[in-house]
Image (cartoon, rainbow, N blue to C red):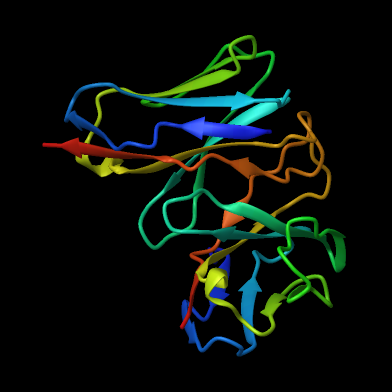
Amino acid sequence: GAGVSQSPRYKVAKRGQDVALRCDPISGHVSLFWYQQALGQGPEFLTYFQNEAQLDKSGLPSDRFFAERPEGSVSTLKIQRTQQEDSAVYLCASSLGASGGVSSYNEQFFGPGTRLTVL
Amino acid sequence: SQKIEQNSEALNIQEGKTATLTCNYTNYSPAYLQWYRQDPGRGPVFLLLIRENEKEKRKERLKVTFDTTLKQSLFHITASQPADSATYLCALDPSGGYNKLIFGAGTRLAVHP
């Protein structure tokens, strides 16, 4: 079956350009997460959606980062005026349910990521 | 500060041996801890979850332990194979809420024939 897909897989941007990264979650998955992974590091949480509602954006590093999921399925992460420090792999993950915690853990399924290089 | 630590150096072992990876955390009291596998150019893949009231969890050749007193989890791969070579990440949800995960940096495992 289809997993989480992300596009583009690779993106090269000149410093100052705006970029848009797309995530297609697994159909029917309520929760969607964006993570940023620097080279040699683990993924770092950016933001979380439950359906179309952005419930947590505490990990977004600056107001240049913006994410949306207008119809509760596809999500877009937009980075304005890219900087070299934005170079990283951006991972999207989705999970079936909305609630969390011990009794109702929902496995996160990750996409392959978009590797962003800012020159 | 809150953090998760994993062995930063790569672990090299011979095929057939048991690989043991360590995950230590500070200033968290997670209700559960998870282990993921990540191959180059791919996203992490969920392997196992262990709850705070579970001392040990097994899945095929994988075994995870969770010591909430030591704030440590150990991840074992028995009868290792070259196909087990990958980076292994531990992760926890500090809030016990909607599964917002905090990851360690990962340990790279190389299994040699």
Q: Residue furthest left?
A: B113
Asked if residue A18 is positioned above or below residue A6 in the image, the reply reads: below
Q: Nearer the viewer, residue A50 or A41?
A: A41
Q: Residue at x 80, y 35 (%)?
A: B95
Measuring 55% from the left and 19% from the top, which residue is drawn there?
Answer: B72
Q: Nearer the viewer, residue A67 or A59?
A: A59
Place of residue B17 in the rendered image (x, y in percent of width and height, measured from the top left) = 21, 22
Q: Quadrant of residue B21?
A: top left
Left or right, residue A76 beside residue B59: right
**In this figure, what is the number of numbered marks?**
0
Give the left or right position of residue B88, taking residue B79 as reference.
right
- Relative to B112, is B50 on the left or the right? right
Q: Residue at x 75, y 71 (%)?
A: A73
Q: Is residue A36 above or below residue A98?
A: below
Residue A37 position in % (x across, y down): 53, 58
Residue A102, percent across and down? 76, 29
Along the line of sight, the residue nearer the viewer: B113 or B58? B113
Q: Where in the figure is residue A27, as x and y percent of width and height?
A: 69, 66
Query: Residue drawn at (58%, 65%), measured in percent from left and top?
Result: A4
